[in-house]
Each structure stands twice: as structure tokens, then as C-alpha cells.
Amino acid sequence: MLVNWEVIINIISKTIELSKKEKEYTLKLLKCLVQIDTRRLYAELGYSSLYEFVRDHLGYTDGETATRVNAARLMRSSKKIEIKMDKKEITLTQAALIHSNFKNESTEIKERIADLSTGKSKRETQRIIQNETSPAKTKTLRLGANLCQLFEKVQKNLDGASDYETLKYLLEKELGEINPKRAGKLRGKERYIPLSVKRKLLDRSGHRCEYKTAVGVRCRARSNLQFDHIIPIYRGGESHYPNLQILCSAHNLAKGVSVVDES
Ligand SMILES: [Zn+2]
């Protein structure tokens, strides 16, 4: 059989060119996602998170969405890493891996892992991450029934604070590092919403975020719902039914941002 080298070379150079373009477009897409995330533009479109926007509006699968959202968040976290990604020193997959494993760590740590991962394969990057996240730094606590009961009692006093918040509160209190302003906020009696009112609010909202966009599109979020004071407590709002609404965490946070902006 006669090999047509011209055709083969053509296909290969076309493939190389397209792959280069694909990487460039991915970078451009990530930069737009960073903007959408920073300004919470997804909330304007009625989505409760960047993740929901990418999956449902852009039509990516869950896996593709997680990769893009994680990579965008890593890019957003550090100018140094953004430059690294621009220069294609780390790939989309590597960026996503680093973010999903170190999202609660400092920028310095993320930058260090990104440096270590430069020019490495996916598997090598996974190994680097594994070394860095070895159990030496974490601690798992098991509470027996008695301790559990005490812990939950404290938690109730803190108006349903999370496990993390409760333990942090107790440790900081022991070490005398509690900021009185924050402790007040965590404990605040004014924030207390009676269970009957909470039930009424959930019924009214149909267990769904009550946020509506300017054109009246209602948010679809049914998870991470929070009780929100329409007029904030620090502005004299009260924990009464008419001053309360159900918001998803994204819209509650977005509201916090705009309240801070206007004052
Ligand atoms: Zn919402």
C-alpha cells in the first residue's frame, strides 16, 4: 500500500494546532469563570453556585464541571499561579487537583504545590499531593456518648454552630484567644429564631431559596438553605417572621456583600 505522507503530515499538524487552540480556549474560559465567581454573576442568573452555573447552563458533566470550577478557583487564589497557568506550566487537571486538595490552605502552600508540580504528569502530581497531605497534620477525634451529649449542649448554646465552629470556640476560649465581638455574634440571643417560626418559613418557601432576580426569576437551590434577616440585626432588624426569609448560602453571602458595599 502506498503511504501518502502529505495526508499524514497534514492530519498531524492540524491535530497539533487544534490541541494548542483547545488549551488556549480552556484558559480563556477559566478566566471568565474567575470573573463570574468573583462577582457572583451566577446568582444574577438564578444559580446558587458557580458549579451549578457551569453544569446546568454550560452543559458540562459533573466531572468536567468539578475540574473547571476547581481550576478557576485555584487561578483566582494567586496571581503567581495564574501566570503559571498562562505559561502552561501546570495543566487544567493539575490545577483542579491542587485546588480540591488544598482549598482551605494558605496561598503560600498552594503556590508551593504548584511549583512542585510544574512540568510533572498527573500521576506525579497526585503523588506530590499525597506526600503533602499525609495524616501527620490532621487529627480525628472520636467522642463517646457522654462527651457527645456535652458537645451538643454547647452547640445548642451557640445557636446551632457547626462541629468545627464549636470546637474552635471551645479551644480558643480555653486559650484566651476569643475575640469578644465574634463570641457575641456566635452566641447572640437576638439571632435566635424559634423552631415554630423556622417551620413556618420553610413551609412558605417550599424548602427552596426565596431569592428573586430583578426580572423575577427565582433561585432553584434546595440545599444549603439559611435563615436570613431581611433587615440585618446590626441595623435593628428583629427575628420575627416578617423580617425573615430563606436564602441559599450563595445568595445569603451575596446579600452580605451588597450590604457591606452600600454602607
Ligand atoms: Zn439562592
Image (cartoon, grey):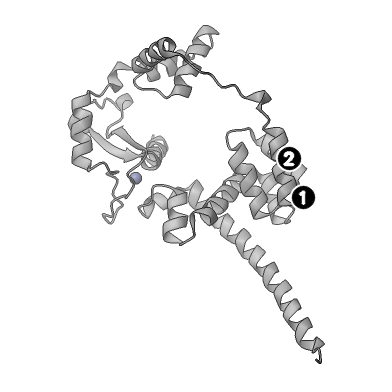
Any part of residue 240 in sight: no
Q: Are marks 2 and 1 in contact (CB under 8 Å)?
A: yes
Mark 2 Cα shell of 10 Å, populated few (<14), some (14-19), many (≥20): some
- Left or right: 119, with 135 as reference point: right
- Residue 116 left/right relative to 21: right
Q: Where does the image place residue 186, in percent across and percent down from the top left?
A: 39, 19
What's the CA distance linking mark 2 and mark 1? Answer: 10 Å
Tell me: residue 15, above or below residue 201.
below
Residue 43 position within the rendered picture, expressed as x and y whole percent measured from the top left: 39, 49
Q: Disc 1 marks which amino acid?
A: Lys
Q: Amino acid at mark 2?
A: Ile
Q: Is mark 1 within 8 Å of ligand 1?
A: no
Please name the residue that numbered disc 2 is placed on.
128
**Which residue is the extreme one toward the bottom?**
2
Residue position marked by numbered label 1 in the rendering: 120
**Image quarter (top left, top right, bottom left or bottom right) of the N terminus:** bottom right
Q: Between residues 8 and 170, which one lies in front from this camera angle?
A: 8
Question: Splitting the image into four quadrants, where does ligand 1 fall?
Answer: top left
Residue at 48%, 12% (x, y): give it.
170
Between 192 and 156, which is closer to the camera in this rendering? Answer: 156
- Residue 41 locus on image (x, y percent): 43, 52
The image quadrant that residue 203 belongs to is: top left
Which one is earlier in the sequence, the residue at label 2 or at label 1? 1
Image quadrant holding the C terminus, namely top left
Disc 2, SS: helix
| Residue 195 visible, this orientation | yes
Indicate the secondary structure of the residue bearing disc 1. loop
Q: Residue furthest front?
A: 1
